[in-house]
Image (tube, grey):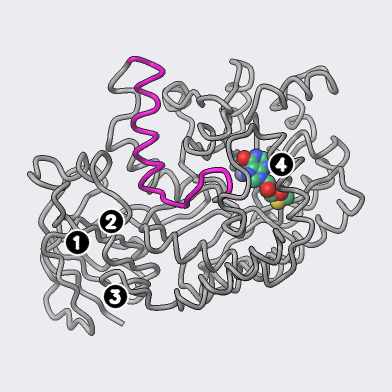
């Protein structure tokens, strides 16, 4: 299949915007610029008044938590998890995971996201079904809480998920290991997860240093801070995507650098759960890869990556009094190029020849886009999810002029509502 996006404003990797066409051949971008000679497109998409950016990468979420959106708000993390979320999650069945993730896919595609890193479970194979059907990319991990009595079984489920799905859906699914957090996984348990991941050559996705309370708990229990605690278990040896990283000291930043840990920064969730502000400018200065995630739709409360990009650009200016703390282009890269790096995907996150054709076209026709002095600035500070017009992933059109091409939106909203009502009755 050959697709031509004709005459769009294309954001190039250096942040400049050029009026250009994008030729897509199969799953990859064949050219950005003039249409290659002899390129016979099966499908032509008019790029007039469209901004072409790499598909957004949601580097940390819990897709099926869409079912718990607006269920428990305005409380801090531990109260939210212990008294509201975990009791309901314990009742989730396979169909809840499927319809919750399908609802997430609808919302993500409609807001321009093509890749998501998901930590949840059980029944992660149903999230894999959604990835396969939707045409998105998914970096899936079985969330593992080690303090529960069936922790070992969950490690086995993550192993099975890896064996069955790593590289599935034409390579659009990859699998990591998902130990939930230091405060839910004792040291011997983390050592077992580390061993299982290393044996398979798999990477790890974990929540780290989200709240001051959890750090105090680890210090009390083990006499050290979370990064030192986890490092001693060997878990950081196979490559790590660490969500949150809000409260860090110098020693921990040194551990992060030593192990090339990539960070999924979740500004919306951190603000809503009153967790704090991650030291993103410092992490960037230290050369640490910082990506963006929404976290689940129950703590955010949406899966809109453009909103996270906007929050990242604004939040760090507030806390640092520095307008350059996270400039607009840097925020966009955190949601695209750095996101792809953080979740371990090569050839994703940049619009250039040879890259995977994961492309989001944003309409610039609305009043908020006038005048057009700087398209990247407009996207980051003025654009909204509703401006996302067309989305391609791996060369396939997932949404065209806001109509989903791979998913039945009406049915998904109906089934997800039904599951949510049953769960919370
Ligand atoms: C064991 S599957 C993943 C697990 O994580 C929970 N979760 C959702 N958001 C957060 C967060 O911000 N911090 C810690 N844990 C979170 C989710 O409810 C699942 O139980
Ligand atoms: Zn999370």
Q: Is mark 4 within 8 Å of ligand 1?
A: yes
Image marks 1 and 2: residues in contact by CB distance under 8 Å:
yes
Q: Which mark is first along the chain, 3 or 4?
A: 3
Q: Quadrant of residue 114?
A: bottom left
Is the residue 165 above or below the residue 80 in the image? below
Q: CA distance from mark 1 to mark 4?
A: 46 Å
Ligand 2 visible in quadrant = top right
How far is disc 1 from disc 2 in space, using C-alphas?
8 Å
Q: Label 1: which residue? A: 32
The residue under the point 26% across, 64% down is 389
Whichever of callouts 3 and 1 sits on the residue coming sooner in the sequence is 3
Query: Of label 1 and label 4, which has the lower sequence position?
Result: 1
Q: Which residue is mark 3?
A: 25
Relative to residue 185, is residue 10 depicted above or below?
below
* Secondary structure found at label 2: loop
Element at badge 4? helix
Q: How many other residues sit within 10 Å of disc 4, few (<14), some (14-19) or many (≥20)?
A: some
| Label 2 close to label 3 by CB (< 8 Å) | no
Q: Looking at the image, is mark 4 or mark 3 nearer the viewer?
A: 4
Q: Which residues are magenta?
A: 298-321
**Which residue does the image show at 56% across and 71% down from the upper left?**
130
Q: Which mark is residue 81?
A: 4
Labels 2 and 3: the sequence-earlier one: 3
Element assignment for label 1: strand
The residue labelled by disc 2 is 351
- Residue sitting nearer the eye, 421 or 231: 421
């Amino acid at each position: 299949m050959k697709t031509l996006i004709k005459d769009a404003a294309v954001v190039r990797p250096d942040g400049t915007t050029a009026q250009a066409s994008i030729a897509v051949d199969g799953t990859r971008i064949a050219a950005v610029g003039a249409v290659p000679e002899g390129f016979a497109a099966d499908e032509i998409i008019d790029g007039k008044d469209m901004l072409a950016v790499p598909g957004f990468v949601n580097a940390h979420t819990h897709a099926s938590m869409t079912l718990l959106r607006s269920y428990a708000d305005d409380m801090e993390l531990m109260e939210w998890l212990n008294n509201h979320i975990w009791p309901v999650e314990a009742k989730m069945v396979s169909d809840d995971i499927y319809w919750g993730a399908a609802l997430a896919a609808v919302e993500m595609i409609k807001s321009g996201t093509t890749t998501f890193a998901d930590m949840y479970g059980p029944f992660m194979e149903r999230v894999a079904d959604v990835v396969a059907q939707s045409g998105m990319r998914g970096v899936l991990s079985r969330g593992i809480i080690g303090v529960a009595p069936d922790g070992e079984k969950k490690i086995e489920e993550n192993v099975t998920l890896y064996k069955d799905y790593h590289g599935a859906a034409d390579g659009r699914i990859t699998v990591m290991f998902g130990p939930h957090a230091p405060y839910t996984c004792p040291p011997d348990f983390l050592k077992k997860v580390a061993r299982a991941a290393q044996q398979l050559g798999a990477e790890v996705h974990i929540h780290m240093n989200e709240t001051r309370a959890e750090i105090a708990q680890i210090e009390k229990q083990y006499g050290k801070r979370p990064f030192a605690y986890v490092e001693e278990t060997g878990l950081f040896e196979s490559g790590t995507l660490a969500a949150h990283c809000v409260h860090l000291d110098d020693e921990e930043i040194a551990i992060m650098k030593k192990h090339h840990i990539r960070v999924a920064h979740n500004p919306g969730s951190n603000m809503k759960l009153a967790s704090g502000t991650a030291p993103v400018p410092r992490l960037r200065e230290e050369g640490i890869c910082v990506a963006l995630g929404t976290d689940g739709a129950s703590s955010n409360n949406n899966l809109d990556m453009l909103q996270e990009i906007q929050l990242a650009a604004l939040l760090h200016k507030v806390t640092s009094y520095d307008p350059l703390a996270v400039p607009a282009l840097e925020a966009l890269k955190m949601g695209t190029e750095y996101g792809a790096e953080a979740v371990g995907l090569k050839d994703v996150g940049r619009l250039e020849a040879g890259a995977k054709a994961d492309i989001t076209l944003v309409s610039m026709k609305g009043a908020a886009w006038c005048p057009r002095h700087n398209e990247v600035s407009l996207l980051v500070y003025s654009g909204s999810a509703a401006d996302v017009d067309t989305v391609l992933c791996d060369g396939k059109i997932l949404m065209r002029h806001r109509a989903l091409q791979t998913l039945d939106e009406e049915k998904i909203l109906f089934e997800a509502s039904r599951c949510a009502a049953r769960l919370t009755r």
